[in-house]
Image: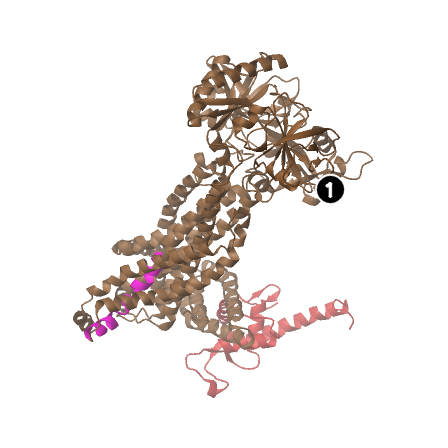
Amino acid sequence: MQELDMGATSEGLSRSSFLVLLALADQPRHGLAILDRVLEVSRGEVRLGPGTLYGTIQKLVAAHLIAETPTVPDPADHDSRRRYYRTTPKGERALKSEASRMRALVRAAVAHQVLGER
Amino acid sequence: MLTGATFIRELARGALLLYPVRFRRDHRADFIDAASHLLRRESSTRTPFRALLTTSRVLLVDALASAPGMWMTVATSGSSGALGGRMAESVGTWLRGTRHDLYLATRSAVRLPALTLAIVGTLSLGIGVSTAVFDALDRAILHPLPFARSEELALVVMREARLEGTMAVPLATFQNWRARATSIRPLEVFRRQRVIQSTEAGTETLNGLGVSGGLPAMLGVKPVVGRMLAEADAAPSASAVVMLGESRWRTTFGADRAIVGRVITLSNKPAEIVGVWPAGARLDFEEPPDLVRPLPAGQEYRDGSWVQVIGRVRHGHTAEEVVSELAVLTLPTGSTQLVYRPTIVTPADLLLGKEFVSGVWLVFGGGLLLLGAAIANASQLLLERATERSHELGVRIALGASRERIVRMLLAEGVVTAVVSLGASALIAGAIEAGLAHFEPRLFVEAAGAGLGGRAFVFGAVVAGGASLICTLTAMVRAGRHKLAVVGPMRVTSAASSAVTLLVATQAAMAIVLACGAVLMGQSLRRLSHVDPGIDAERLAELSVSLPADRYPTPTSWHAYLENALERLRAVPGVAGATTSAMPLMLASEMNGLPRLDGEPESTSPSAPLMAVVEAPRDFLRVVGIRLRAGRLYETDERDVALVSESLARSHGGSVVGRWLYLPRSTKAATIVGVVGDVRYAGLADDESRMPAVYLPSPPAASSFIRFFVRTEREPADALSAARQRLAAIDRSVPILTADTGPEVIGRQTARHRFVAVLLGSLATFGFILAMSGIYGAVALSITRRRREIGVRMALGATAERLVAAFVAHGLRPVMAGAIIGGAAVWFVTPFLKALLFRVSAHDPSSEVVGVGLVLLTAVVAAIYPARRISRIDPAKTLRES
């Protein structure tokens, strides 16, 4: 069990925290890019509203799972008004541990043929 | 005009207000950007409208889901550790700010009194009208039976498939249902009854309501004072008890609580008053009862008398299941077909009539249209106010007021407007209801004492809040588009002026639809009041009496009274004749099938029409004024003779005098001695079925219930009071049950038409007022905005008259567009009135001409008035100002 401050329940990370961490896993991104990335990784299933997005960012920053970064992945896309975020090592650990917890859960479900024939 | 992107940005700004201060400070720009981003992304895959809808939904759901959590975080993470830390502080700041906002809002409203009055007036008119109409709808159709779980209550009648009419449930059938039905129970009955109360001063006929013993408990009625009637009171051996109706208790007994326990004499028997029946416990739309009495168990009524069966549908059963169960229980043993089937009727249809119900719904639609127009107009006026105040707001922003402050200030103005409008609209709604109650008193029986109903008040409050919010927000968003922050006059944009055009066009269209509806109903009513009922009702009066059984026990005694009474009535000065008949005016016994004349085969048609059969003395035809068309009248003591109505004669070739007539299913013949004019037994408004009638001679029928008809030479009202005195002189203990003039009886048949016509007419009037204020506002605003242009044109030599003409023409353009839309809309809307129209086509072109003409005339007046301001504009001054 990790010591997560606000972004998590005793069960693990909240769904929005998990998705934001996942969106930042490969490179730093600004808010709107996180919004698009979440839509992309969830295959169009999850639309984060602005309140949830920035609320989650605020929580994850406060829990030191992500941090603001001056590094811009694509200088051509740079906009000085935008704030970019990256995951911290603590955030990466939390994401990994949450993902493996979910994997274990999915494996258990598959073993019980919850999803039908393999 | 408001674009989708602006709307979403404004929505995001609004949503932000739900979040804690820190979040707003840190993420305001990002938040609004993200909202716009969402819209852009949605727009790439959907139509602009769908994209707007989806984005708005995401924004609202997201705000409601995420904001509370953030407030919780703020509350629990206060640095002082206690809950009373930052949260209490921010709540305190918010409250102080709100109080200040409300103060500022009131002050600014008072500063522009004319405009504020116009805004409040427009809004409260819309809210008041729609609330009053909603109240009528609620009382008549949505909740006609004001009891707990009223949706379970069902009224059961017997109905013959081919006929419109209904029949009372036979007593044995009712008792069978009551004992065995499982899908509907308990089953109870109630009926209206005349009750005769004897006091030392004489007798008085009271309006009674008889209820079966279990009815009060089933409905959950609580007494005003004393106790309710119970099952035990209905036991045949129980001593007689009675409850006073609340209105009689208040008016006659001065709401005396000590009345409980007093004994009064009803139908010559003592009965103890046990309590007061509340006025709100209304079972029909008749006058509230003076007395409520238990109907004795097992003999609730005699077959043939009208009672109403009411029950609670058990949970899990549908109306169809109830009907089929009751039908099975009704079937006589060995039979498979029912002539009369049990049917569940909605209270509104049974008590008020289908046409009336559809008319009320239509009027409610009209009320909502008016409300929409009022909101649009108020929003227009608020924009005008914002224009007037653009300097003030500019100064505020320049002095450092945040956009949020300005928004809060405008919202506070919205709240003040809502509260004042709600108060004013309650007055307007009350006035309209008082007016409506004049035409249809049955509907507002309860309202007479209690004022506006609770649901109507909630409706009004929600509408007032919603309306003020909508017009504040639209005015705000539109003002925002005009860059309020820039100090100086606003420039009119083409988008804004097209919104105004659309608004005026819609209002003109609405006014036309309402006006056409009102004109159609007016024409219909006029034609209805000119219909020849077939009798001469102008100088006619009808009275009825009930002979007490102890003083008049035998047919001989009834007959003696009847002869005596007729003689005295004929002696009244100004009375040309008096007679009696069992049926009231304009009603006759109805028979299934048509008569057959000699030499004609018996009709085998399965859908036999109805025929009226009137058995009456010769005098009846003369006194009531049924006209002889051919042949002669019969003598009362003649045998085997008959008179037929004109339509019946016509359907048999015209000359029928001297032929033999057989009534359906009868082999007894009567010679036709004459043909008389048609009487509208099927109802004044029923143009299609001239119900054929046969008149048979019969001596005055004597029963304990006697109906007199009196032909007068002068106003029937005068003769009526003289007739009452004569009857009272014979025997003071015989109560007079009814006394009506002929025009009153005929007038009752047109009451519903009159009610809907008056409703639509008043709505149309309000519609005109709103359309006028809309057109006025639009022209006034365009002159304010184009002052400079007017100045330039005048400087270049244009005369004030030409400019006025140009502005009026400009102002009328949207009205023309509205006339086209309205003219088309009328085509689709008026057919809903069809059931209420009489000898007028729903697509009557003259109503449309009148409607469009009235609106155009109104529009010209409304446009000329503000346009006259142009002549007061001084070009030199205007040019210097700019």
Q: Give the range drawn in magenta.
A: B772-795
**What is the chain letter for disc 1?**
B
Residue B635 on image: x %, y %: 61, 23
| Image quarter of residue B174 | top right
Residue B440 on image: x %, y %: 47, 38
**Is residue B791 located in the magenta-colored stretch of the structure?**
yes
Where's the C terminus of chain B, which quadrant?
A: bottom left
Q: Which residue is drawn at 74% across and 40% down?
A: B603
The disc labelled 1 sits on which kind of residue? Ser
Where B301 falls versus B425 (above or below)? above
Q: Can residue B411 be seen in this view?
A: no
Q: Which of B750 and A95 is in front in this view?
A: B750
Q: Which residue is at the far bottom?
A: A76
Chain B representation colour: brown
| Crowd band around label 1 with a 10 angstrom C-alpha radius: few (<14), some (14–19), many (20+) | some
- Residue topped by disc 1: B324
Q: Can residue B128 be seen in this view?
A: yes
Where B727 falls versus B531 (above or below)? above
Where B78 falls versus B735 (above or below)? below
Residue B763 on image: x %, y %: 42, 50
Chain letter for the red colouring in the rendering: A
Lateral position of residue B642 relative to residue B800, left or right = right
Identify the secondary structure beneath mark 1.
helix
